[in-house]
Amino acid sequence: MIYIENDSTDPFFNFALEYYLITEKNLPEDQIFIFWRTEPTLMVGKYQNTIEEINQNYAKENGIKVVRRITGGGTIYTDMGGWQFSFITRGQSDTIDFSKYISPVIEGLKKLDVPAEFNSRNDLVIQGKKFSGNAQCMLNGYTLHHGSLLFSTDFEQMVKCLTVDDYKIISKGIKSVKERVTNISDHLTKPIDTDTFKKLMVDSIMQGSKEHYQLTDTDLARIKAIAKEKFASWEWNYGKSPKFNITKTGRFDGGKMEFKLDVNKGKITDCHIYGDFFGTMDISVLSNALIGAAYEKESIKKAIAQSDIKQGFYNINVDELADIIC
């Protein structure tokens, strides 16, 4: 097994690194190991609807990155208080097998006197509380297994990223998360910082081996290009979302408006509007303006502005509508 040191905290770069090693780089070793982390990020599963999984407004306002993985599973929140690990193995199996890759992680934690266990699905737990999610895929003759490790992650921010912006719901969510999820640092017999934790885990998993590969300038340039072209693109992170229907209702000074939307590949494909509002313009003008817009606030604001609703609807403005629709 060969280790690749990756100091990047850019999630787009980090997922591009995995993808590059699987699809373009042919290293001599049959297994590659990487231990890495990111700035605050929401990592969405390959088959998930990004728009329905995250609190877009909170993520944007707080500079939280959003990226889609090439593996399945659910959305997770990661930050500088957590770590990710990746195993890239030459050869594909017919079935997904988590235990092969989780076992060395559990052994590393046991050396720190952390009583970690595998819950038989895809999670690692301590005393029944989750601290790690795992995902796996087969691609281009390789098996990729990666997982998260909550070390000292901000649970309050985690909940706000993944929950609608309602104080009561968020408060209940934080309480619920703390009952079901835990940080590794809370279970250490002796406190250590995140960097020391990384070193101890890497040393354990590599079993003393010093085999490593240093990314070259050529490698880095190609990885950055993949990050920009694929993992940082709107098309990958939102446009890959499956088709869905959504109803949004707003109550304004000028009355109630209800939007029934069809969204496909991240864009509005159909729109019907109902309500007890007052207006002088044909409602189809607004409906047609929204069709084709990306389902995110700035695109919707631009689409609404084209219909000149300031003159067409009583006491309803562009910002209010965009807030309700998205």
Image (spheres, rainbow, N blue to C red):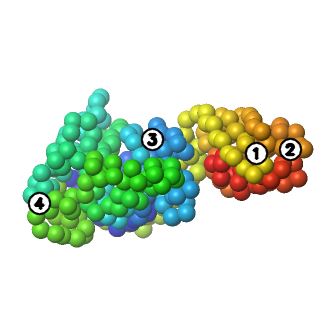
* Residue marked by disc 4: 112
* Residue marked by disc 2: 279
Question: What's the distance in space between the residues labelled 1 and 4, CA to CA?
Answer: 61 Å
Q: Secondary structure at mark 2?
A: loop
- Chain-order first, disc 2 or disc 3: 3
- Residue 318 seen from this side: yes
The mark lying in front, picked from 2 and 1, is 1
- Chain-order first, disc 1 or disc 4: 4
The mark lying in front, picked from 4 and 2, is 2
Label count reads: 4
Residue nearest the observer in this picture, 29 or 147: 147
Crowd around label 2: few <14 · some 14–19 · many ≥20 (10 Å): some
- Would you say the residues marked 2 and 3 are in contact, meaning their CB atoms lie under 8 Å apart? no
Position of 169 relative to 58 (above/below): above
Q: Which mark is residue 46?
A: 3
Amino acid at pointer 3: Lys
Question: What's the distance in space between the residues labelled 3 and 4, CA to CA?
Answer: 33 Å
Residue 206 coordinates in the image, percent (x, y): 17, 57
Q: Residue at x 39, y 39 (%)?
A: 72
Q: Secondary structure at mark 4?
A: loop
Q: Secondary structure at mark 3?
A: loop
The quadrant where residue 319 appears:
bottom right
- Would you say the residues marked 1 and 4 are in contact, meaning their CB atoms lie under 8 Å apart? no
Amino acid at pointer 4: Leu
